Image (spheres, rainbow, N blue to C red):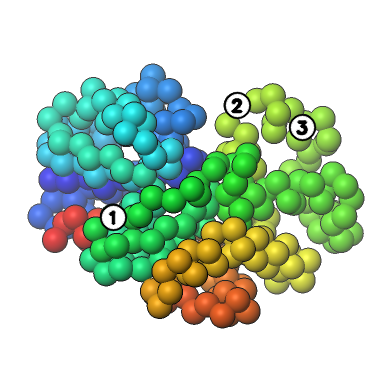
Amino acid sequence: MIAVVYSGSKTAAWKIANEGKLIAECSMPGLNPCFVEAKTVLQQLNKKITLINYAERIKKIYVFSAGANSPARRKELTETLASFFKFSKITVQDDIYGAAIAACYHQTGVVGILGSGSNCAYFNGQAPEENNFGLGYVLGDEGSSNYLGKIILKHYLQEKLPPELLKKFRKRYDLNRSQILERVYQKSMAQHFLSSFLDFYIENREHAYIQRIIDEAFQRYMDTYLLPMVKQYPGQDVHFVGIVAGNFPDRLKLVAEKNGITINSITKEPIYNLLNYYSN
């Protein structure tokens, strides 16, 4: 019996399989070791009946998590999980590693993440090559859901939203300036708060103003991540993974085409491909 985990900073998805068949699944708050303490992870694990029921029977766990981008962070998360799954062999890698496997399997390619965060890497068929991306929601994450959250909040506070969108936003969220600034600058897990506004984009995806913000965010992603990577690794297939890419595939392809790039695949939820990869 195996478990596969794919975790952004906001949510960790768990799939448990036996002899290649999915037998259980659940989700919990993200495992990002940069933001979440071991104690908090263990508290969340102990709330999940599914994981409690299968903890002693799972023999291998493959974890791909945002923030697990150094040996120290991977060791930290491995030890935390091992204290709960005492009979499991646990392997922890960062989320770009999981995204690359989900998109490419054993083939080479350039893989982009557009989820709660953003990143990009060249996958050599075995592992992603190291790069200087992945700067997090303060210094990076262009095109991600937390980046889009920052943009919509800025436009809201600066009264730049069209009247019909402004009315919808106020009705849905009922937030004033002081509440927003407190959530962003004083309370913990600001990136979760920022990412939560992706639903507003999805619900208003046909509005020209929303489409313009999306396109500008994707262009920012192209300039920062994808164009330098494609230049460094010419001729490689280009793949995308993540909830933002998966919810706006047409706009992503349109912006990519304007930059002379063809996207070969877009995978909204990479965990299903990862489960298939490690189950067979």
Of the pair 279 and 163, the residue shown nearer to us: 279
Of the pair 58 and 140, the residue shown nearer to us: 140
Where is residue 249 shown, x and y percent of the image?
54, 71
Residue at 65% x, 25% y: name it: 187
3D distance between C-alphas at marks 3 and 2: 12 Å
3D distance between C-alphas at marks 2 and 1: 33 Å
Query: Could you tell me if the residues under marks 3 and 1 are in contact, i.e. CB atoms within 8 Å?
Result: no
Would residue 272 be visible to someone looking at this image?
A: no
Residue 270 — which label? none
Q: Dot 3 corresponds to which residue? A: 181
Mark 2 is on which residue type?
Answer: Ser
- Pick out the residue farthest to the front: 232
Where is residue 275 shown, x and y percent of the image?
25, 56
Q: Dot 2 corresponds to which residue? A: 188
Mark 3 is on which residue type?
Answer: Leu
Residue at 47% x, 75% y: name it: 263
Q: Is residue 267 left or right of residue 155?
A: left
Please tell me which of labels 3 and 1 falls first in the chain: 1
What is the quadrant of residue 241 in the picture?
bottom left
Determine whether 187 is above or below 61 in the image. above
Where is residue 190 shown, x and y percent of the image?
62, 34
Residue at 49% x, 29% y: name it: 35
Q: Dot 1 corresponds to which residue? A: 127
Where is residue 27 shown, x and y percent of the image?
38, 42
Residue at 18% x, 51% y: name it: 17
Query: Could you tell me if the residues under marks 3 and 2 are in contact, i.e. CB atoms within 8 Å?
Result: no
